[in-house]
Amino acid sequence: MTPDQAAAMAADLLDDASKNLLDNAYVQSCGTVADAYMRLHLTLATGAAVNWDEAFPEQRG
């Protein structure tokens, strides 16, 4: 997957979520997956190795 493909997937998911605003679970799922695609996009685009636990400690389970 290229950085552009990852960004396009995120955009498609967010667009899909915007068409289903009354379904909270669906919108949340789309947002979560879109966030993952954007993180992938950033990693691929910069070539950076990122420690996601340090970068986003609020996401730790």
Image (cartoon, rainbow, N blue to C red):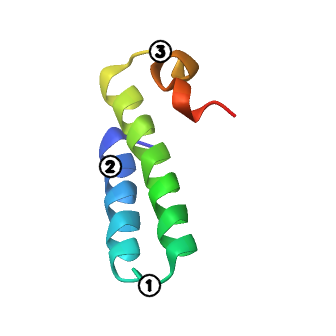
Please report the residue visible at 47 percent of the width from the left and 15 percent of the height from the top: 49
Mark number displayed over residue 7: 2
Q: Nearer the viewer, mark 2 or mark 1?
A: 1
Determine the CA span between mark 2 and mark 1.
25 Å
Task: Find residue 26 and report its horizontal and vertical position in percent.
Answer: 54, 73
Mark 2 neighbour class, 10 Å CA radius: few under 14, some 14 to 19, many 20 or more: some
Please report the residue visible at 57 percent of the width from the left and 72 percent of the height from the top: 25
Q: Is residue 53 above or below residue 37?
A: above
Please report the residue visible at 63 percent of the width from the left and 30 percent of the height from the top: 60
Residue under label 3: 49
Say how many tags the image has: 3
Q: Nearer the viewer, mark 3 or mark 1?
A: 1
What is the secondary structure assignment of the residue under circle 2?
Answer: helix
What is the secondary structure assignment of the residue under circle 3?
Answer: loop
Mark nearer the N terminus (2 vs 3): 2
Task: Find residue 30 and report its horizontal and vertical position in percent.
Answer: 48, 64
Q: Is residue 20 above or below residue 58?
A: below
What is the secondary structure assignment of the residue under circle 1?
Answer: loop
Residue under label 1: 22
| Quarter occupied by residue 40 | top left
Mark nearer the N terminus (3 vs 1): 1
Of the 4 image quadrants, the one containing the N terminus is: top left
